[in-house]
Amino acid sequence: MGKPFNYGGQAIIEGVMMRGARTMCLAVRAASGEIVTHCEPLNPRIYSGWIAKVPFVRGLTMLWDTLGLGMRALMFSADVALGEEDVDFSGPVAWGTMGVALVAAVGVFFVAPLLLISLIDRWIASPFVSNLLEGGIRLAIFLIYLWAVGLVPDVRRVFGYHGAEHKTINAYERGDELTVEDVGRNSALHVRCGTAFLLVVAVISILVFAILGRPSSMVVRIVSRLLLIPVIAGIAYEYIKFSARHQKYWIMRALITPGLWLQRLATRPPDASMLQVAITALQRLLVEEQLVVAQEQPAGRLAAAAAPATVAKAGQP
């Protein structure tokens, strides 16, 4: 199996989650110093079914699944890092926490800017300018939030693991050996980063809302924002995929650059122990994905699929 385009990851508490085409694996450093790993299959209907081939729609389903996986991985990593027994990777608490987080995010980044702009809206004659200022406030809130949380020591460690995740994916995609030394020489920035995705969402929301006019009712205005969130997210997802595939062109590299700059707020230089955790997560994922591929192959191809070059290169014995 060749190197797939869709390997990605997420920083979690004292660890990294890596996601492939069929499987998700995470590695977390426990309080004892041991690296604990966990893997589980991805929903094939989302990642391999017909919905994965429908532009814009696929983005919504994958983003929703990513949110769920990310929240549960964060809770799992917190339990492992604190040395909790009988770690549960799912349950109503995880989904409830994700629901509260989503409501808070929508309130802060979509509703709050409208409420702030309403304080001065009566003096703004142009609906276009009003919507543009609303988008500017939304973008400012996002940037201030990202900068502020980066000042928290625990969050800074998560940002260090974020850098480790990017370095590991970059090393794999460049063809480097998955060792701490080789991975550490790679960039901590990546074009498919979720931080860049959020920036794209903010910019696209400015463009979309700016052409909608200005309803006289604030309630209608708020509802229009909420209803358009899925549309904006779907557009942003397709843009990120397109830009990553066409980054060799100078104009696309120029469009990608602001997202890379922004990642400097959400990543920190990782230490060797963080790099080792990220490498462990990717190595485990590569092995698990190859096992799934081997199981899917006809009997005559099992031997060839069981020992692919990517696993050997990843440092597996």
Image: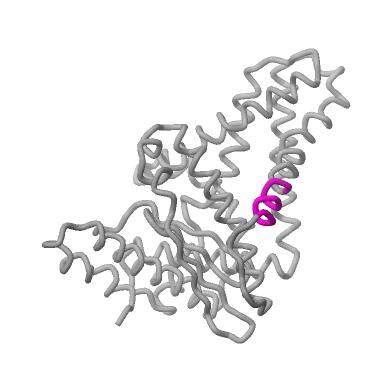
Residue extent of the magenta highlight: 92-100
Q: Quadrant of residue 207?
A: top right
Q: Position of residue 287 (x, y in %)?
A: 34, 69
In the displayed structure image, the side of residue 204 where residue 249 appears, left or right = left
Residue 245: quadrant of the picture: top left
Specify how the rendered protein is coloured: one colour
User: Dividing the image into 4 quarters, which one contains the C terminus?
Assistant: bottom left
Q: Is residue 127 left or right of residue 199?
A: right
Looking at the image, residue 93 lies above or below residue 121? below
Query: In the rendered view of the protein, which quadrant contains the N terminus?
Result: bottom left
- Seen in the image, is 184 located left or right of residue 305? right
Q: Residue at the spot x=46%, y=32% of the render?
A: 56
Judged by its main secondary structure, the magenta piece is: helix
Report x, y in % for residue 100.
Answer: 73, 47
At 58% across and 85% down in the image, what residue appears? 33
Q: Is residue 300 magenta?
A: no
- Badge count: 0
Task: Choose top left, top right, bottom left or bottom right for residue 316.
Answer: bottom left
The answer to whether residue 95 is magenta is yes
- Residue sitting farthest toward the bottom: 32
Instruction: Identify the residue at image location x=52%, y=79%.
Output: 35
Residue at screen point 29% across, 58% down:
3
Q: Which one is in front, 302 or 27? A: 302
Q: Residue 196: where, in percent of width, then height?
A: 55, 47
Image location (x, y in percent) of residue 251? 41, 38
